[in-house]
Amino acid sequence: MPSSPLATRINSSVDKALEVFSFFLGQDEGWTISDLSRRTGMYKSRIYRIIKTFEKHEILRLNEKTGKYELGSIIKINSLVQNGKHRSQRVHEILRDLSKETSGTAILRKKLGWKLLTVDVAVSDHPLRISYEKGTRHPLTFGAAGKIFIAYDSPPLTEVLQHYNYRLPSFTKKSITDPSKWKASICKVKAKGYYLSDGETIWGGRGIAVPVTDKQGHLLAALSLALPTVLFPLSRLPGLLSKTREAAEKIGELLA
């Protein structure tokens, strides 16, 4: 059966998108829209639409310092799995070590659109523990990790509020749903560099999250540490925060 005109157009669009994407593989310098237009022979307007679609899904990102587009963080994380099993295992080892040192569950999350994806997790061996599974997704506003992404990455809080029609998801009775309180929370994250969630996603649980960044300070992921409240008195916060930040720095070096 011959292809329909619509199918032919779709295939052509996919082919063009893959052609553009192929220029980003195997090199780190990045490309401008003008450069790609000259190399591919496509109009800048078409290149722009393709680039913006890739950017929306974090496959590509704009390096504001160079003005060039480069591979996005989700591709870097996927490359970690596809091209570097040793590094992938090392990331998990860092999570496992953090879990053993703190008796908490260590979770590495990435933003995918309006969702948080659990990229990797090391569940605590302690009889009293909080468990998450690798591959699970949560709303962008979920827990301490959600605060990290909204504070350090896009979209801005105003856009988040609009997306949820100013009715932010509630997970427990302690979840923050008031926009003004959310704004105050984001300000605290930016000032302190971490967020402490106290029963906001799991009743009887506490968690902290810190940003995972590359050397240029670009946000790659969020690292969280979750424990039952009985194992996480506030007197432990300085020590747990220090260990979590240390682990985040190590992971950032591997993902960058």
Image: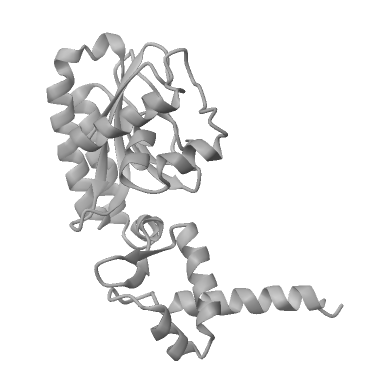
**Residue 208 screen position, x and y as percent:** 27, 27
**Which image quadrant: the C terminus?**
bottom left
Above or below residue 57? Residue 144 is above
The colour scheme is one colour
- Residue in view at x 53 percent, y 75 percent: 18
Observer able to see residue 39:
yes
**Residue 39 screen position, x and y as percent:** 44, 89
**Which image quadrant: the N terminus?**
bottom right
Relative horizontal placement of residue 20, taking residue 107 as reference (left or right): right
Relative horizontal placement of residue 2, taking residue 43 as reference (left or right): right
Relative horizontal placement of residue 249, taking residue 82 as reference (left or right): left
Instruction: Check the image and name the residue furthest to the right.
Output: 1
Relative horizontal placement of residue 248, taking residue 183 as reference (left or right): left
Q: Give the total number of marks visible in the rendering.
A: 0
- Quarter location, residue 131: top left
- Quarter location, residue 98: top left
Instruction: Check the image and name the residue furthest to the top.
Output: 230
**Residue 22 screen position, x and y as percent:** 45, 77
Observer able to see residue 137:
no
Please state which of residues 28 and 190 is positioned toward the viewer in this rendering.
190
- Residue in view at x 37 percent, y 40 percent: 150
**Residue 20 screen position, x and y as percent:** 48, 78
- Residue in view at x 31 percent, y 72 percent: 67
Above or below residue 180? Residue 254 is below
- Residue in view at x 24 percent, y 15 percent: 232
Please state which of residues 124 and 169 is positioned toward the viewer in this rendering.
169
